[in-house]
Image (spheres, rainbow, N blue to C red):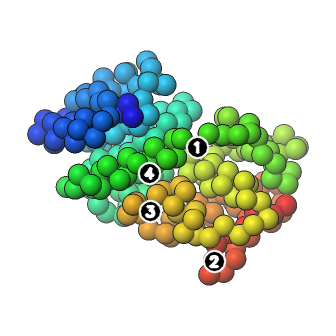
Amino acid sequence: MHILLAEDDLILGKFILYILEKAGHHVNWITDGALAHKEITAAPAEYDVLLLDWMMPGKTGIEICQSLRQSGYQKAIMLLTARDDIEDRVTGLDVGADDYLVKPFQKAELLARLRALQRRNEKQLQQDSLQVGPWTLNRRHSSLEADNGTEVTLSPREFQLLDLLSQNKGTVVPRDIIFDRIWGRESDVSLNCIDFYVKSLRQKMQLVPGEYIHTVRGVGYKLEE
């Protein structure tokens, strides 16, 4: 993989660089957030994964992640941080990070998380759009539009969840499968985050009345028209 590492701690940065290069990855290490953001936006297709430190001079990892997602950036993003409170983790995921690794971490955990992100990168979209009752899920632009012209904006996680349920329309998708496909088994985020995003999707889709996402108690969720 080609990875951009944005980390201003020189000791930690050298350690991560050594780990990644020894594992066969190509790494561009930048120590300033603003410069990292400029590099990514100049060549958005260049990197398979972004490793962004939460706190950096110039621009924080959170600011970079949020800006990239708002501009439609779809590649994998992992935040590196010493913040391990649940509120901070939710903040990181809500701005569009695919994963969240708390410092200090072990080499094996970092590489396992990267493998999980790589598996998601390798899953190519087969269709540009999917139909969800009166809604059309545009997979190219990560948007949701109803037959009557109503359009809602989806966060990266909301899009991933609705996309997964749409691909399995009429079939119950277990919670552990949802968690594995979207966050990865190695993630230390709680399973309860699934409920948060299901609730958010339901609220947005209620702009066109109907029951689309059904809860199968004790198992998971099912999308029906």
Establish if 96 lies above or below 26.
Answer: below
In the image, 39 versus 46, the foreground residue is: 46
Residue 185, label in figure: 3
Return the disc, 4 or 3, that comes first in the chain's sequence: 4
**In the visual, does 145 lie left or right of 58?**
right
Q: Gap between marks 1 and 4, in whole Å?
A: 11 Å
Q: Gap between marks 4 and 3, in whole Å?
A: 8 Å
Tell me which amino acid carries mark 3.
Answer: Arg
Question: Residue 201 placed where, x, y %?
Answer: 66, 57
Query: Can residue 9 be seen at all in this image of the molecule?
Result: no
Residue 123, label in figure: 1
Occupied quadrant, residue 129? top right
Categorize mark 1 by other alpha carbons within 10 Å: few (<14), some (14-19), many (20+): few
In the image, 208 versus 47, the foreground residue is: 47
Return the disc, 1 or 2, that comes first in the chain's sequence: 1
Residue 47, label in figure: none
Return the disc, 1 or 3, that comes first in the chain's sequence: 1
Quarter of the figure that contains the C terminus: bottom right
Residue drawn where x is 25% and y is 29% of the image = 29
Q: Gap between marks 2 and 4, in whole Å?
A: 23 Å
Return the disc, 3 or 2, that comes first in the chain's sequence: 3
Residue drawn where x is 56% and y is 33% of the image = 72
Query: Can residue 87 be seen at all in this image of the molecule?
Result: yes
Tell me which amino acid carries mark 2.
Answer: Val
The residue wearing badge 2 is: 219
Q: Are marks 4 and 3 in contact (CB under 8 Å)?
A: yes
**In the visual, does 63 lie left or right of 130?**
left
Q: Nearer the viewer, mark 1 or mark 2?
A: 1
Q: Gap between marks 1 and 3, in whole Å?
A: 17 Å
Describe the element under mark 3 as helix, strand or loop.
loop
**In the visual, does 122 lie left or right of 104?**
right
Tell me which amino acid carries mark 4.
Answer: Ala
